[in-house]
Image (spheres, grey):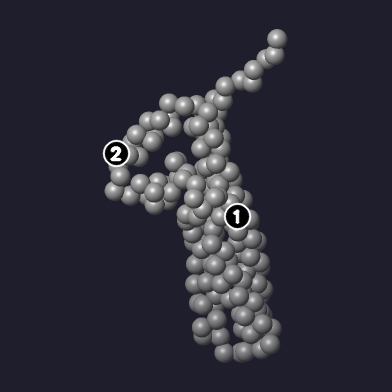
Amino acid sequence: MSVSPPEPNPDHAWKTLALMNEWIRHSDAKAGVTLAFTGVMATMTFNLTKDFTHRATAFDSLVVIACLLLIITGALCGWTLTPRVKDKDADRDAINRLFFASIDRNYRGKRQEYSEVLHTLTSDPVELTKDLADQIHVNARIATVKAAAAKWAIRCALAAGAAIAALTLVIGTTNS
């Protein structure tokens, strides 16, 4: 007697999708905090340098380094916070019945038709789990890209902070 494979459990897939969404939110939160910190550091850099008159190579170099790092940090935060609405791995003709952009693109103005599609989908655990798996796969890629960008944004922000600290020391020693 052969044992048949267990039926898919959509509840487990929903929990996995929720976990992926949490990872995306964590990266977005880190990028938001880093972006705010970057704004504070940019303001501090401006205030430190605007009236400084004893220009030297060390001063100019540190200002350029700090500004470049702040710009890179801001760009990485922006990249992290940018919504992703395209699944580059998906078949162009495939309809993801759980992804908002695909629903909008394929069922715009067809609310009743989508309602029937969703009813059919949620009535079939195998199909629902397949669609959830597709969405989990997409969200895993999004979470990975966002986490990598947030990681580098944080690293650049820390490096910018170090450059600003060194700039403060140069200004302090020059003024004393």
What amino acid is labelled 1 in the image?
Val
Q: Is residue 13 left or right of residue 115?
A: right
| 59 shown above or below 158 | below
**SS for dot 1:** helix
What amino acid is labelled 2 in the image?
Gln
Residue at x-position 39% and y-position 35%: 118
Identify the disc placed on residue 96.
Answer: none
Q: Nearer the viewer, residue 83 or 74?
A: 83
Circles 2 and 1 in contact, beta carbons < 8 Å:
no
Which residue is disc 1 drawn over?
Answer: 145
**SS for dot 2:** helix
How far apart, in angstroms, are the residues tagged by discs 2 and 1?
35 Å
Residue at x-position 61% and y-position 89%: 54
Which residue is disc 2 drawn over?
Answer: 112
| 4 shown above or below 79 | above
Q: Which circle's residue, 2 or 1, is located before the other in the chain?
A: 2
Q: Is residue 153 left or right of residue 14?
A: right
Q: Nearer the viewer, residue 81 or 88?
A: 88
Place of residue 25 in the rendered image (x, y in percent of width and height, measured from the top left): 51, 47
The N terminus, quarter of image: top right
| 50 shown above or below 106 | below
Q: Nearer the viewer, residue 105 or 78?
A: 105
Residue at x-position 30% and y-position 45%: 110
Viewer-side label of 2, 1: 2
Place of residue 91 in the rendered image (x, y in percent of width and height, measured from the top left): 54, 50
Q: Is residue 142 visible?
A: no
Place of residue 114 in the rendered image (x, y in percent of width and height, measured from the top left): 35, 40
**The quarter of the displayed image where residue 98 is located:** top left
Dot 1: few (<14), some (14–19), or many (≥20) neighbours within 10 Å? some
Place of residue 136 in the rendered image (x, y in percent of width and height, measured from the top left): 55, 41
The C terminus, quarter of image: bottom right
Residue at x-position 47% and y-position 44%: 96
